[in-house]
Amino acid sequence: YGDRNDQINPFFAKKREWSHVKDRILGAYIVAYLQTIQRRGRPIVIVDSFSGPGRFGDGTEGSPVILCKAIKENAKGAVGISCIFSDIHPAHRDALETNLQAHIASGIALKPFANFSESLTKALEVGKARNATLFFYLDPYGVKDLEFEMVKQIYERNPQQSTEVLINFNFKL
């Protein structure tokens, strides 16, 4: 752990209490969402664009692992549910790919993208091509990482296609 590009940020050494709470909310929400949205019978793409390494240093699961497990445990029928992940930090992406290896191999997740822009572009392309339902979990490291022009693309998506966004704004006054 450290601040270099080849090191995981020290924030991820141990999961803090607020992260436990946030991830419990995400886990419960995604299960309820999947149970409801699968009834539409359309492919589902879940996007976590500020993924981190997928697992904390103390072994606890991060949002990418929570999302993939929820899909594995709640997928019904042949709807087709997949995840798109990204993280701008190279060491986080490497760790994320390792932590998601089984889910990548099974087709639940794609290999992580380098940043929000890449994951957003891929999700919008897949969503349009497959008429898929999109779910975005946006939990950036700070509000500065969440550029309005990129989020605006989600808002401008065809209103005939189901799109859901769960955002965490984390900033100091």
Image (cartoon, rainbow, N blue to C red):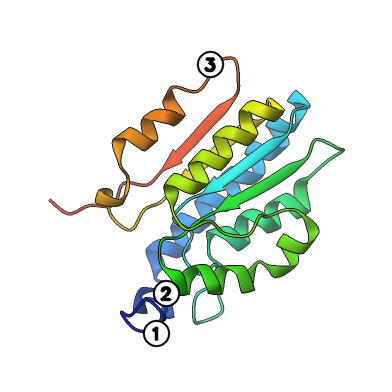
Local secondary structure at mark 3: loop
At x 50%, y 56%, the residue is 86
Badge 3 amino acid? Pro
Quick one: label 1, few (<14), some, or many (20+) residues within 10 Å?
Answer: few
Secondary structure of the residue carrying tag 1 is: loop
Mark 3–mark 1 Cα distance, whole angstroms, equals 43 Å
Q: Please tell me whether residue 121 is drawn above or below residue 112 in the rendered image.
A: above
Is 161 positioned to the left or the right of 91 in the image? right
Q: Mark 1 and mark 2: span between their CA atoms?
A: 8 Å
Looking at the picture, which amino acid does disc 1 mark? Tyr
Q: Residue furthest top?
A: 160
Chain-order first, disc 1 or disc 2: 1
Seen as rendered, the residue at the extreme left is 173
- Left or right of residue 152, residue 37 in this image: right
Q: Which residue in the protein does label 1 denote?
A: 1
Which callout, 2 or 3, points at the residue further toward the start of the chain?
A: 2
- Mark earlier in primary sequence (3, 1): 1
Q: Quadrant of the N terminus?
A: bottom left
Specify the farthest residue to the right: 77
Picture coordinates of residue 29, whole percent (x, y): 57, 43
User: Are dots 1 and 2 in contact, CB under 8 Å?
Assistant: yes
The tag on residue 159 is 3
Where's residue 153, x and y in %? 42, 29
The label shown at residue 12 is 2
Q: Residues within 10 Å of mark 3 (few under 14, many from 20)?
A: few
Report the residue at 37% width, 76% height from top. Answer: 5
The label shown at residue 99 is none
Label 2 is placed on what type of residue?
Phe
Q: Is residue 45 above or below residue 22?
A: above
